[in-house]
Amino acid sequence: MYTLDVSVVLNAYNPKEVDSIASAQMMRLLVARQIRIFAPTLILVEAAGVISRIRGDVALAEQFADTLQRLPTLTLLVLDQELTHRARRLAAQHRLRGADAVYAAVAQQTSTTLVSLDKEHLSRLHAVIPTVTSRAVLAQLYATPPPPFA
């Protein structure tokens, strides 16, 4: 099980970015193998905002967020009081930006590995939350055969 940071989702969407292919393949495999993915509801807001700013297309931004929300293995967590407390503590202890702390809090609360391309996630959280890149997850998925059909 994994928590996805918006950096990975947006990286998968933009083929001009480094590791875009790895991020896209990883996401396809996670869904195909029915591996649970977690993210805060914030991911929908951030993704829509970035797509709208980059592409200048409101309808495309909304469609992207809708498609993301409908991923069959994705569970979205609401920023409730408990998650807010975790995020606040992680932000203060590890000098994270607010949104970055929310993704970290989701990973911590769900006991999952945080998949991120964010340098602060990767450098500051490794001692408290397993944090890896999409390329590392992809390598692990390829090394592990899919479960047999029942």
Image (cartoon, rainbow, N blue to C red):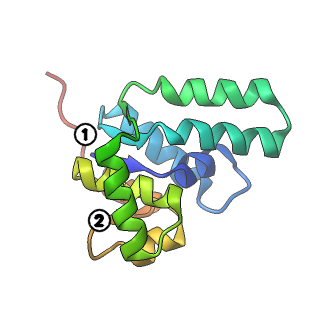
Q: Please, is residue 116 above or below residue 10 in the view?
A: below
Left or right: residue 133 compared with residue 126: right
State which tag comes first along the sequence, 1 or 2. 2
User: 9 or 75: which is nearer to us?
Assistant: 75
Q: Please, is residue 63 above or below residue 138 in the view?
A: above
**Residue topped by disc 2:** 130
Left or right: residue 105 compared with residue 53: left
**Can you give x and y, in whole percent of width and height, for residue 1 in the image?**
27, 45
Mark in front: 1 vs 2 = 2
Q: Residue furthest right?
A: 56
User: 86 or 60: which is nearer to us?
Assistant: 86
User: 81 or 75: which is nearer to us?
Assistant: 81
Residue drawn at (29%, 65%) of the image = 130
User: 124 or 83: which is nearer to us?
Assistant: 83
User: Which dot marks residue 146?
Assistant: 1
Q: Residues within 10 Å of mark 1 (few under 14, many from 20)?
A: few
Label 1 to label 2: alpha-carbon separation: 22 Å
Q: Please, is residue 7 above or below residue 9 in the view?
A: below
Residue drawn at (53%, 65%) of the image = 97
Residue drawn at (44%, 60%) of the image = 101
**SS class of the residue under badge 2?**
loop
**SS class of the residue under badge 1?**
loop
Q: Residues within 10 Å of mark 2 (few under 14, many from 20)?
A: some
Quadrant into which the C terminus falls: top left
Left or right: residue 75 compared with residue 149: right
**Can you give x and y, in whole percent of width and height, for residue 45 in the image?**
60, 38
Q: Mark 1 belongs to which amino acid?
A: Pro
Q: Residue furthest left?
A: 150
Residue drawn at (53%, 52%) of the image = 8
Give the quadrant of residue 87: bottom left
User: Which dot marks residue 120?
Assistant: none
